[in-house]
């Protein structure tokens, strides 16, 4: 009897704790689409037009990274081909014939969002860009995403390429559970060493990661068509959440994403302010 009472009390306190995390109203989000979910259970904590199909820009590099990481052999070298360099900025201006390890390129992809790096990894993984794009769409379906179609590994605009906030949250959960990607995505600064020996410091494009200590990833994106996009993750006292914000503006994307994470983590405005780092 006493044990049953203790278990009942503990269950009630756990329920009370979870409920208190969402006692406050969710923040207002001006972006076209958004979703917030518990990274562990998958429970949706907030959503706005989360199933609307739209371009997601470079956030789809998270799926590119997931496929490469899951394929493995990340310490092996890859040689850059001429076809890999045929893309628009942002890129690292890799030269044909240069060789880099997959883990080196994977890190540069997630930290700096380089489009040529995405092409190198895609060609290396599947033989050519179109085959890798088919692999992306297939992997999304395996993750349970049903409203996505990918035509390149970097998210540059092309007719017929789209996803949704909900589908991208599935990719984000899988990436969050991958130890290699989890470690890379929290990297704020990375020194990229070119094959020539030149070292260039890369700063993570994720402003929420650079600003708030509770943020630990994930991936930015922007094109004129997609607007500003950000998939971000956060952790606090054993709770992990993921926010996907698509179709926002440069002025709002970081702060709206941060407030969504804070809401999911049960952080008050004062706690959020206290966890703001001294500099970006």
Image: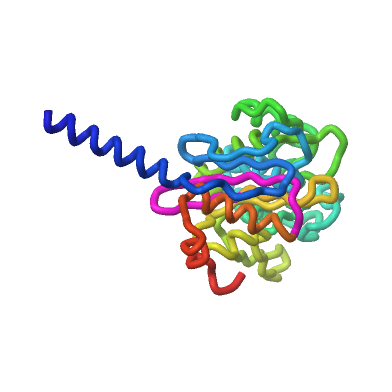
Verify whether residue 240 appears in magenta: yes
Report the number of numbered marks: 0
Q: Is residue 244 left or right of residue 21?
A: right
* Position of the N terminus by quadrant: top left
Q: Residue at x 62, y 55 (%)?
A: 107
Tell which residue pokes out farthest to the left in this image.
2
Q: Is residue 210 visible?
A: yes
Which of these two is toward me, 106 or 265? 265
Which of these two is toward me, 181 or 27? 27
Relative height, residue 51 to residue 32 (above, below): above
Spot occupied by residue 90 in the image (x, y as percentages of width and height): 79, 57
Q: Is residue 82 left or right of residue 127?
A: right
Which of these two is toward me, 275 or 188? 275
Verify whether residue 92 appears in magenta: no
Relative height, residue 237 to residue 200 (above, below): above
Give the main secondary structure, helix, strand or loop, of the magenta stretch.
Answer: strand
* Stretch in magenta: 232-250
* Position of the C terminus by quadrant: bottom right
Spot occupied by residue 179 in the image (x, y as percentages of width and height): 49, 46
Relative height, residue 114 to residue 136 (above, below): below
Tell which residue pokes out farthest to the bottom in this image.
278
Which of these two is toward me, 212 or 221? 212
Q: Residue at x 78, y 57 (%)?
A: 91
Q: Residue at x 80, y 35 (%)?
A: 161
Spot occupied by residue 241 in the image (x, y as percentages of width and height): 51, 45
Relative height, residue 136 to residue 237 (above, below): above
């Amino acid at each position: 009897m006493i044990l049953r009472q203790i278990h009942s009390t503990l269950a009630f306190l756990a329920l009370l704790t979870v409920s208190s995390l969402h006692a406050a109203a969710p923040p207002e989000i001006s972006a076209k689409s958004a979703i917030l979910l518990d990274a562990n259970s998958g429970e949706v904590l907030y959503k706005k037009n989360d199933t609307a199909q739209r371009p997601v820009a470079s956030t789809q590099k998270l799926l590119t990274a997931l496929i490469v990481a899951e394929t493995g052999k990340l310490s092996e070298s890859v040689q850059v081909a001429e076809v890999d360099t045929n893309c628009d900025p942002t890129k690292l201006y890799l030269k044909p014939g240069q060789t880099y390890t997959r883990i080196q390129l994977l890190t540069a992809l997630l930290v700096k969002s380089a489009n040529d790096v995405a092409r190198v990894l895609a060609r290396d993984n599947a033989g050519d860009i179109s085959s890798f794009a088919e692999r992306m769409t297939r992997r999304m379906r395996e993750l349970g995403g049903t409203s996505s179609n990918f035509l390149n590994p970097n998210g540059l605009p092309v007719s017929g390429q789209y996803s949704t906030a909900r589908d991208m949250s599935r990719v984000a959960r899988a990436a969050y559970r991958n130890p290699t990607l989890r470690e890379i995505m929290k990297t704020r600064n990375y020194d990229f060493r070119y094959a020539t020996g030149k070292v260039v410091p890369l700063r993570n494009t994720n402003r929420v990661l650079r600003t708030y200590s509770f943020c630990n990833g994930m991936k930015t994106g922007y094109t004129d068509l997609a607007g500003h996009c950000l998939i971000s993750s956060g952790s606090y006292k054993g709770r992990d959440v993921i926010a996907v914000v698509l179709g926002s503006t440069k002025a709002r994307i970081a702060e709206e994403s941060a407030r969504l994470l804070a809401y999911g983590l049960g952080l008050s405005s004062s706690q959020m302010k206290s966890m703001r780092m001294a500099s970006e």
